[in-house]
Image (tube, grey):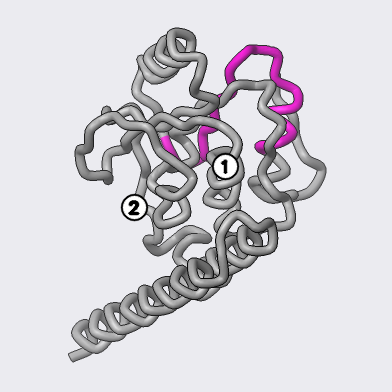
Amino acid sequence: KVIRNSVNMGPSYSRNTGWDNASGELVAFLDANDRWKQNKLAVQASFMTSNAQYALTGHLNNFQKVTESREITFVDLLHQNTVQTSSIMIQRDIPVRFDPAMKYCEDHNFLIEVAYNYKIYFLGMVLGFLERPQLSPGGLSNNILEMRKGQLRIYVSQYKKHRIGLIKLIFMCTRSMAAHLLKLCSRFRETTGASS
């Protein structure tokens, strides 16, 4: 079944619409420029059927370093989003949804919301392929300022929901801004190096 939006509503709205119209017990997402291995759905669905305590699973893609399979917690995701959207498989009846109001970091926000209430497991095997690395030129994630703003909004939101304390909020925001400055310095060096 193909559902078309009359206008571009953004990834969150489209994912939610597909999810709300799904009839199976599990839902998976695939961005237009990504691919799955042929056995991805079978492997992930088999794991989730045998391990029903996990509401969501993710897996490695071709640009990620090899890592062991492990449970991922709310705190893990707060510090770093290692679960790429096209690797997600989630139980259909989970009530959390992507926030259509967020244009940047909506996937990170979604995963944090899921992790706060449910268990997440990460499969240490490559089951998907990205056309380009995340945060690389050509995608929304390349806009590092807007991505940073999105990340800071997530931290403030978690503080307002009383999930993290003030000291944790200050630490996370300071860490995020330091990473932003390092990224800017790196891009500046790349630009000046290329022009010299």
Residue 35, percent across and down?
A: 41, 32
Region rendered in magenta: 15-34
Q: Is residue 120 above or below residue 159?
A: above
* C-alpha distance separating marks 2 and 1: 27 Å
Residue 127 at x, y percent in the picture: 33, 27
Q: Is residue 88 magenta?
A: no
Residue at image point 34% right, 52% down: 133
Q: Residues within 10 Å of mark 2 (few under 14, many from 20)?
A: some
Q: Identify the image quadrant of residue 177.
A: bottom left
Q: Specify the farthest residue to the right.
A: 6
- Residue bearing the label numbered 1: 116
Name the element at disc 2.
Answer: loop
Mark 2 lies on residue: 133
Please give left or right for residue 119 compared with residue 68 in the image: right
- Give yes or no for contact between labels 2 and 1 (Cβ–Cβ under 8 Å): no
Q: What residue appears at the point 32 percent right and 35 percent down from the top-left corner?
A: 60
